Image: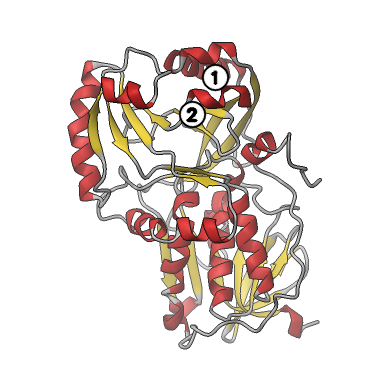
Amino acid sequence: MEEDRKFDVAVVGGGVVGCSVLHEFTSLGLRCVLCEKEENLVCGASSGNSGTLHTGFDAPLGSLELRCLQSARELNESFFSKHNIPYRKSGGFIVAWNEEDLEKLPKIVAISHEAGVSDVRQITAQELLEKEPHLNRNALGAVHVPGESIVDPWRIPVTLANLALAQNATILTNCHVTGGKRQGKDWQLSTSKGPITASVVVNCAGLYGDELETIHRQSPFTIKPRKGQYAVFDKSAGKLLNSIIFPVPTPKTKGVLLFPTVYDNIIVGPTAEDQLDRCNAEIDRTVIDTLIYRAQTILPSLKEHSVIGTYAGLRPATEFKDYCIECQPDKAWITVGGIRSTGLSACLGIAKHVAAFLPSLGFENCNSSPENGLTRAERKWKITHPIAKFGLLTGEKIDP
C-alpha cells in the first residue's frame, strides 16, 4: 500500500486544468495521482463556465494567458475531433449598440491582430444582419472573430481524465489535501484518504489555489471569487442564433454574452459579480430577469421561447490580470493559479507550458509513451456541468 501511494507527481484539483495537466504528464510516462476534494470531477470553477472557446483576441498583449491560448488554438480542434467531443467553430461578433462603442471597434481589431488573431475584421451593420438575421436592427456595426467556438465543457475534462486513466493515472475523489511537508526529496501530503507521497506537487486547486499554496509558502496571489449567472433558453430557440454575440468588452470582463450551445440551447451570461464566498454561487432572480430582458432585446424572437433553467459559476479571479503559473524547482512545486475565464479555452496550452518545467524538476527524459494501460475500462463520471445537463436531457441518456 505504501508503494501504491508513491507517485512522481500529485496534481491537486480535478477541474479542466488539473485534468489537462494530468493527461499531459501521464502521456510523458510519469506516474501521477490527481486529488479532487469533491465526490466528482468538474465540480468547482469548471462546472460553471460558458462552454465558449476564446481565441485570445482581447487577452493582455505579452501575457502568459495569450501564449497559452495561442498554443491551445493549434491543439484544440484536432483533439476534439479525435475524441468525439461536441464542438463547433461558431465565430463571434463584438457588437456596437451605440456610437461610443462603434468608435472602439477599430482598436479592438488592431489589438486582435497584435495578439496574432489575424482574421478579425470590422463589419457593417448590414453584414452583421446578413449573418445573424434575427438580431435587433439597432446594431450599428461589429467586429467579426471567426475563430471563436463552442464546445461541451464537461466532455473535455472527463475525456482528459479517462485518457489519463488509460495511461496509468490514479484519480482520487473525495480526497481533500489538508496539509503537507517535505521529507527528503519527496512531498508527504496529508489527505482525507490518507497520506500520499509524490516527488512533485502541482497546485491546480482553482478557487482554493491560494489556500493550498500555503502548504509551502505564503501565496503570491489571493483568490477573489467572481460569480457569473446565466439563463438558459429552450432548444426550440436554437435556430435563431449561429454565433457568439459579445458586447464591447471592459477592462474587467468580456461582458454578458448571448451564445448558442453545441446542443442548440441559447444562453445569456455570465455576469461578473465579486464576492467573498468560494463555495456558493447563488442565483439572484432579479439578476436573471435582467439577463433575460437583455437577451430578448438583442434577439427579439427569444420572447417566443421558454427559459428552461439557470445556473451560476465562480471564477478564480486574482489581483492580477494574468495567469499565476510558476515552478519552484528547489521546492518541487508547480503553481497553476488565477486561471479566470479562459481555462477551458487554454487548458491544453497550459498543460504544455507546465510540462516544460519538468526538466528543471529532474525529469529529463519525459518523452516516452507510458506503459500500456488501455485495457482499463473508462470510468463513468457524473455530468456536473449545466450545459451538458440541459443539452442531454433529451435524446441521449444521462448517467446518474
Q: At which x and y percent is residue 166?
A: 68, 72
Q: Residues within 10 Å of mark 1 (few under 14, many from 20)?
A: some
Of 52 and 34, the residue lying toward us = 52
Q: Is 346 placed above or below 232 here?
A: below
Marks 2 and 1, Cα distance to the nearest angstrom? 8 Å
Q: Could one spot residue 14 in this view of the protein?
A: no
Q: Earlier in the sequence, mark 2 or mark 1?
A: 2
Residue at the location (39% across, 20% down)? 133
Q: Is 107 placed above or below 69 here?
A: above
- The number of callouts visible is 2
- Per the image, label 2 sits on a secondary structure element best described as loop
In the image, which disc is placed on residue 271?
Answer: 2
Q: Amino acid at mark 2?
A: Thr
Q: Is residue 319 left or right of residue 370?
A: left
Of 226 and 19, the residue lying toward us = 19
Q: Residues within 10 Å of mark 2 (few under 14, many from 20)?
A: many
Residue at the location (18% across, 33% down)? 106
